[in-house]
Image: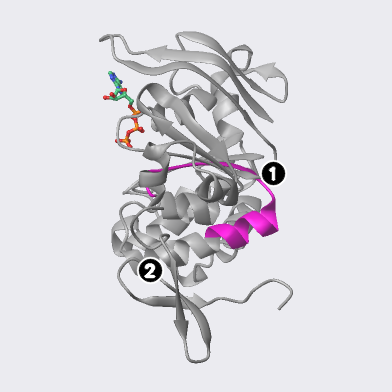
Amino acid sequence: MIEFSSVSKTYPDGTAAVDDFSLVIPPRKTTVLVGSSGCGKTTLLRMINRMVEPTAGTIEIDGESVMDKDPVRLRRGIGYVLQNGGLLPHHTVLDNVTTVLRLERAPRAAARDRAFELLDTVGLDPALAERYPSQLSGGQQQRVGVARALAADPNILLMDEPFGAVDPIVRAELQTETLRLQRELNKTIVFVTHDIDEAFLLGDQVVILSKGADITQIGTPSEIIENPADEFVANFVGIERGTRALHTKRTGSGTVLVDAAGRTQGVLVEDGA
Ligand SMILES: Nc1ncnc2c1ncn2[C@@H]1O[C@H](COP(=O)(O)OP(=O)(O)OP(=O)(O)O)[C@@H](O)[C@H]1O
């Protein structure tokens, strides 16, 4: 479990990125932090692995403050996936994946075996192992980034807009893979995005943030769609307009659900019918 208690972060230039933020992140589930640009999502994520240190408040992992842990060891125990993959350009895929293992002084052969196992886990062809990041597609680079983050088998995986830079089709593929990985690996995932559809697809717990990392609503996707906290959330989620604003339409053979653009999205099947 990760717990934020009254956490604030003011950067040296006076920007109050996070103001009195408290949240419990349950283990082995995916928590998605979603909100518009600049609301403090990345700052929150980076405070978990101490890449950013809070100005006030505490962050605990399984009851122990991150400030009491050695930052280097802490970071090696937490996988971190960035938007652009964050791969080292002059290192092969294999070397990128084994970076942490080599820092941990794992024997070379064991690290290599583990890297191939990880490439398989993230759905990459082992033939890509000797390539450099520039010789991979954006989607493949992201998979390498995930493999690298998983290398030391961390309990926690932080993902900061990991699919922001790939095209929509690859993005959908990577989202499906993330769901599969979560089922198979059972990690505590903290995922940052500004895309509410991505948040609802991946999140067991979704946290909708506004400026200063102010929590506007927190809940499961169903809870939020069924009972949006206010007009901002209803708009953000697209309940009044867009694909989630469904209307019923009677047809000769039953009732269908139609979206705001007039496209039929499905058939209404009444419970117990
Ligand atoms: N190193 C820094 N120094 C000063 N201000 C910063 C720094 N890093 C972030 N900020 C500011 O803190 C606020 C929150 O930034 P943060 O990156 O956490 O937001 P975000 O929600 O992740 O945004 P985005 O979706 O655009 O990445 C913003 O106003 C940003 O400009």
**Classed neighbour count for the residue bearing mark 2: other residues with Cα under 10 Å, few (<14), some (14–19), many (≥20):** some
Q: What's the residue at 38%, 52% (across, down)?
A: 238
Above/below status of 254 relative to 137: below
Q: In the rendered view of the protein, which quadrant contains the N terminus? A: top right
* Range of residues picked out in magenta: 178-195
Q: Which numbered disc, 1 or 2, marks the residue that appears first in the sequence?
A: 1
Report whether residue 161 is seen: no
Q: Tell me where residue 74 appears, x and y as whole percent.
A: 59, 26
Q: What's the residue at 54%, 57% (across, down)?
A: 178
Closest to the observer, 262 or 126: 262
Query: Residue under circle 2?
Result: 259
Please name the amino acid that badge 1 sits on. Arg
Total number of numbered discs in the rendering: 2
Q: Tell me where residue 64 appears, x and y as whole percent.
A: 69, 18
Q: In the rendered view of the protein, which quadrant contains the C terminus? A: bottom right
Above/below status of 244 relative to 234: below
Report whether residue 27 is seen: yes
**Residue 167 picture quarter:** bottom left
Query: Residue under circle 1?
Result: 28
**Classed neighbour count for the residue bearing mark 1: other residues with Cα under 10 Å, few (<14), some (14–19), many (≥20):** some
Secondary structure beneath disc 2?
loop
Q: Residue furthest left?
A: 13
Q: Answer with left or right where residue 12 lies relative to residue 73.
A: left
